[in-house]
Image: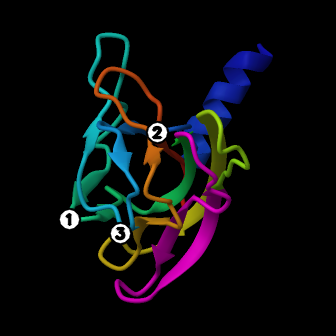
């Protein structure tokens, strides 16, 4: 009886749970990326991947949210430092609330002090964003401080560098 009441209360209050979940991956390894990442993203499309709801859109480096709400953004980033020192490589997730100026809401960084062998690292970051207006609230990802022999890891058939977008509920 308690489960039936919980379901009835959820329906009455309008709480419907997660209505959108989307996963995008960086699909090619890129040497020393710099600035706004404007390409090489694809929605995860292997047979075990899934999309719930409408999903995100991506165009020329800008991510758009499908509906208003509270979103969890989860990032996993693959860094590859090949035979050199690179102490500052990072990706930054920026959010705008006015479709113009971006605030940094998460930074994912890594580095290597080795000049004798390559090092690979996976790092993680996250943010919770209140999307109050889909025409104004957008997201961008920038790459900074990659040395010439360092790579942002990406593949078309697995999630080395990937971004998950989950709509948690209403704003």
Dot 1 falls on a residue whose secondary structure is loop
Residue 131 appears in the picture as rendered:
no
Q: Which mark is residue 36?
A: 3
Mark 2 or 1 closer to N-term? 1
- Foreground mark, 3 or 1? 3
Residue 136's image quarter? bottom left
Residue 4 highlighted magenta (yes or no) = no
Pick out the residue farthest to the left: 59
- Residue 150 placement (x, y as % from top left): 48, 49
Mark 3 or 2 closer to N-term? 3
**Residues packed near mark 3 inside 10 Å, few (<14), some (14 to 19) or many (20 plus):** some
Q: Which mark is residue 60?
A: 1
Q: Which mark is residue 161?
A: 2
Q: Quadrant of the N terminus?
A: top right
Q: Give the range drawn in magenta.
A: 82-108
Q: Nearer the viewer, residue 1 or 125?
A: 125
Dot 2 falls on a residue whose secondary structure is loop
Q: Give the Cα distance between marks 3 and 2.
A: 15 Å
Assess whether mark 1 and mark 3 are in contact (beta carbons under 8 angstroms): no
- Residue 95 placement (x, y as % from top left): 49, 73
Dot 3 falls on a residue whose secondary structure is strand
């Amino acid at each position: 009886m308690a489960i039936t009441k919980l379901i009835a209360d959820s329906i009455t209050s309008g709480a419907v749970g997660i209505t959108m979940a989307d996963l995008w991956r960086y699909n090619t390894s890129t040497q020393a990326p710099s600035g706004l990442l404007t390409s090489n993203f694809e929605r995860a499309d292997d047979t075990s991947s899934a999309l719930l709801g409408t999903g995100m859109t991506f165009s020329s480096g800008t991510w758009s949210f499908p509906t208003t709400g509270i979103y969890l953004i989860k990032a996993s980033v693959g860094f590859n430092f090949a035979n050199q020192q690179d102490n500052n490589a990072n990706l930054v997730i920026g959010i705008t609330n006015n479709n113009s100026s971006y605030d940094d809401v998460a930074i994912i960084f890594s580095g290597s002090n080795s000049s004798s062998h390559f090092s690979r690292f996976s790092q993680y970051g996250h943010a919770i964003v209140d999307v109050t207006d889909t025409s104004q609230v957008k997201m961008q990802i920038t790459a900074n401080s990659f040395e010439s022999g360092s790579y942002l890891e990406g593949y078309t058939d697995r999630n080395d560098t990937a971004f998950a977008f989950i709509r948690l509920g209403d704003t």
